Image (cartoon, rainbow, N blue to C red):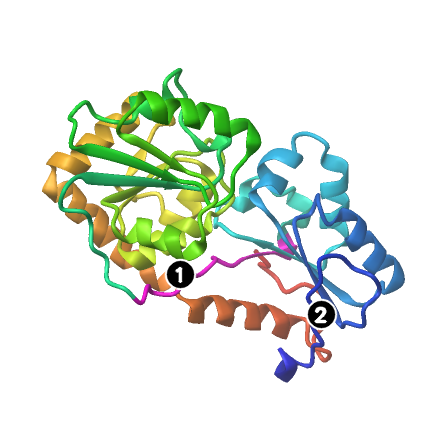
Amino acid sequence: MRQLGHRVTVTADYADEPADTMVAIHAWRSAEAIARFKTRHPKRWLILQLSGTDIYEHLTKDARPTLRSMELADRLVALNSLAWRVVPERFRKKLRVIFQSAPKPAAPRRPSERSIDVCVIGYLRDVKIPKGRHRQRGCCPPRPEFASFTSAALTIPNGQPAATTEMAENPRYLWREEVPRAAVQKVLLRSHAMVLSSLSEGGANVISEAVMAGVPILASRADGNVGLLGTDYPGYCACDTQALARLLQRIETDRSFVDQLRRASARLAPLFSPEREVAAWERLLAELSPNADRRLPRGGA
């Protein structure tokens, strides 16, 4: 970044620190800091990285702060290639897509030989799990050797009672509260598959991590998933427990299906390399270098 002539400050909030460019994360949550920066430095560059909540939730409710942040930003960064479909048309020339990367794990992947282990990594929120009264239990096929593991890196208080109850009633369900990153990666590396059955996603970094680890992914057709995995990815399912249960049974019984998922992940791996992400940010910053024309290039998205 220094080679591109930018002075970059990393901070939880903006308090008039000297910087040539602000990179704001989350349009809605950073709305006040974005407005403050642009009021004080109207000619300085502002890059806004959009979260899934920004574009798939806040644009439909309480949209004013999000739209104002988008308007003030000189560039918008989305984390999946389908985000343009919900970003207002007047802002699309500002939009760039940069996939979040993940390093290749240092340790080899070693799935359990005693059971079929499936992990769900993420927040305990309704939007993250499939529909159905007994949602997690319904995802587990009836055979006793099938184990389903949920590893929650961050816990949401409202999700804890349901997870605790489910774990007490369902021997194939294990919920872990706050799990360090290293422990989450160990769970991932010993899993036969990872499930991302969210109703909505913005471009989950856990997809990058699973792809780079060679772990098959079963995912909903949320734009944020399709915008990373592609329209022809073979591991999509509907957001309901029965459809997911059928795919989980294929993980257990259908070797050709598992091989198909692995080949698909291998093809995707170059998209999530750290080198590719760094190069994308360097190109974006080059657009904003001191000698760059402030006019947006054609075909900006």
Q: Nearer the viewer, residue 144 or 247?
A: 144
In the image: residue 230, left or right of residue 57: left
Asked if the magenta segment contains residue 89, the reply would be no
283 is higher (above) or lower (below) than 243 = below
Q: Which callout, 2 or 1, points at the residue further toward the start of the chain? A: 2
Task: Answer whether residue 240 is visible to the viewer in this image.
Answer: no
Residue 163's disc is none
Q: Residue furthest front?
A: 168
Query: Which secondary structure, mark 2?
Result: loop
- Main secondary structure found in the magenta portion: loop
Q: Residue at x 68, y 71 (%)?
A: 288
Q: Quadrant of residue 86?
A: top right
Q: Residue at x 45, y 53 (%)?
A: 180
Q: How many marks?
A: 2
Quarter of the figure with the C terminus:
bottom right
The amino acid at mark 1 is Phe
In the image: residue 195, left or right of residue 5: left
Residue receiving disc 2: 9
x, y percentage for residue 200?
A: 49, 35
The answer to whether marks 2 and 1 mark residues whose Cβ atoms lie closer than 8 Å is no
The amino acid at mark 2 is Thr
Task: Answer whether residue 29 is visible to the viewer in this image.
Answer: yes
In the image: residue 149, left or right of residue 98: left
Q: Give the residues in magenta.
A: 93-106
Q: Residue furthest bottom?
A: 3
2 vs 1, front mark: 2
Q: Residue furthest top?
A: 133
* CA neighbours of label 2 inside 10 A, class few (<14), some (14 to 19), many (20+): some
Residue receiving disc 1: 272
x, y percentage for residue 179?
A: 44, 48
Q: Residue at x 83, y 59 (%)?
A: 38
